Structures are given as structure tokens and as C-alpha cells.
Amino acid sequence: MKKKIIIALLLCMVTLTSVCAFAGCTTTEDRLIGFDIELAELVAKDLGVDVKFQLIKWASKETELSGKSIDLIWNGLTINDDRLEQFSISTPYMNNKQIAVIKKSNSSKYTDLDSIKDAKFAYEEGSAGQDVAEANNFKNKTGLEAQVDALMEVKAGTSDIALLDSVLGNFYCKSDSDFSDLMVIPNLEFSVEQYGIAARKGDLGTIDKINTSLAKLQANGEIKKLAEKYGLDSEICDLSYESKWDTLSEEEKAGWNYIQEKGNFIVGYTLYAPIAYEKD
């Protein structure tokens, strides 16, 4: 009798799994929200293709892109000279700064660059936060998989300072968040920067299509509406752009033609609010 019950339960599980797969039941991707996620969806719709999202390790983003596991790095990517050499990058779409986040209880201890030099730092591997740590020659530092991990290190007391994007740090250090005991050190900004969307080097066709779409979505108010939803309206850049498609070579158009043929572009992302995260 027990064997029959176990077999029946296993059959039910297999059936339910099949039904869920057929019906398109909720997946991690279905729970994704955030400014960059929803902006990518708007651009994809405007360009007449689908968008898929692939969770990646930030330190492996270059390999993921070159290996065609993803087509775009669209996840609060800071534009700098090295990345301009390595990727084809869109016009800047959002302003950002690198900041230092500490426990509120340490607000009198850590106030300026001189007072933090001997602290324990945490940052995301391969991020602009790591660049800050290395440029300032901070000795006691730990690289982690995600920016949120750096926040958790500070909250747990295993690190003193998280080096983060202001877009993320200001979002999490709110009175109604799980990190309400943390704060941004006032008047201590390491770098002023901008976010861009990266494609494979030489893929000017895809970047041209994205730039053209971003300009259109800004002109019709869609980007403003989305930015207001996430409290980022003051950080959005001027996205005016005129398409250069007709001046591009066939080689430069090949990346976009590849995307059109498969019917989608795949965005590589890491989880952090308000850029890309999972709703409850």
C-alpha cells in the first residue's frame, strides 16, 4: 500500500512539473524588476525583438560577452577608458558616483579619506568600487561577487566600509530597508561616472539601434516615467541621438543582424536594487 501511495505522489509531481513547464509558470526571470531590466524590455519592444536575462558573475562579464552567452552587459556598467577599448558602448544613460557606506554607529569614526584609510573595505570584484580601493591603495580589502554582498559584510561587522555605486547605496540606506542601520559617509565621493550598455567590440549596429531607441523613449516620456518609479529621475542623462545605421559597414551591422535572426538579445545582469532585483 505504501509503495502505491509513493508511486502516485511521484506521478503527481511529474504531472505538475510538466503542466508548469507547458503553462509557463513563474521563473526567476518572471520575478525580475528594476530600472535596467524594465528599460531593456522597453527597448526590445521598440526594436521588435524579445529580451532574455542571464544572471552572471560580474567578474566574468567579459568572458560571457565574448563567448556569446550574452549579447549585452546592461547592469549599471560604469563607462571608463579601459571598457571603451574593450567593448562597444552606448551613449551614457545614467549618472552615478562611487561612495562609502558604513554603520551609523561609526559615523563619528569614519568621516573623510584620512580617517578611513586603515578600515576594512568590501567591494564587488571587477567593479568601479575595486578601482577606488586600488587607486587609493587601501590595504585591507575584500572582493566579493556582488555589491549587495559588500553591504552585508558591513552590516555583519566583518567589514567596516562598502565601496558602492551611489545608485545602489542610496537606495538601500533607507529607513524602510533591511540596511537602515547603514549610512553613506557625507561629502565623500570618490569618482563621478556614467552608466552605459556594452556590446561586443565592433558591434556598432546593435549599439546604434539601442541608442536610437533610447532617444525615442526619452522623447516620448517613457524613460522619465520609469526613472520616477525608481526615484532615479534626477540621474538620467540626455539621450539625444541620430541614427548612424546607413553609414555603417556590413561587418558593423552583423551583430544586430545576428540578434534579429535569433529574435532576441540576451542581457547579462547581477542582482542589485534598483537596477535589477527580484520582487517578493
Image: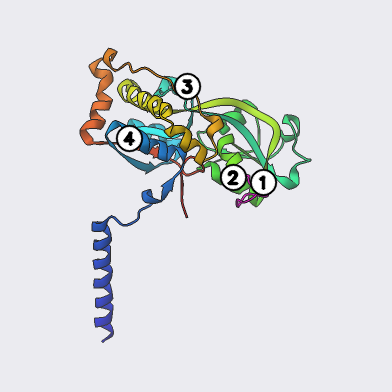
Of tags 4 and 2, the one toward the viewer is: 4
Give the Cα distance between marks 3 and 4.
27 Å
Q: Which residues are magenta?
A: 172-182
Which residue extends farthest bottom?
Answer: 1
Residue 86 in view (yes/no):
yes
**Rendered image: mark on residue 44:** 4
Dominant SS of magenta comes to loop
Q: Quadrant of residue 252?
A: top left
Relative side of 43 to 124, left or right: left
Which residue extends farthest right?
Answer: 108
Count of numbered circles on the image: 4
The first of marks 3 and 4 along the sequence is: 4
Nearer the observer, 79 or 229: 229
Which residue extends farthest top?
Answer: 247
Q: Are marks 1 and 2 in contact (CB under 8 Å)?
A: yes
Looking at the picture, does residue 119 appear above or below residue 252?
below
Q: Residue at x 65, y 49 (%)?
A: 175
Under circle 3, the secondary element is helix
Counting from the top left corner in percent of width and height, residue 214 is at: 40, 27
Looking at the picture, does residue 25 appear above or below residue 118?
below
Relative side of 82 to 17, left or right: right
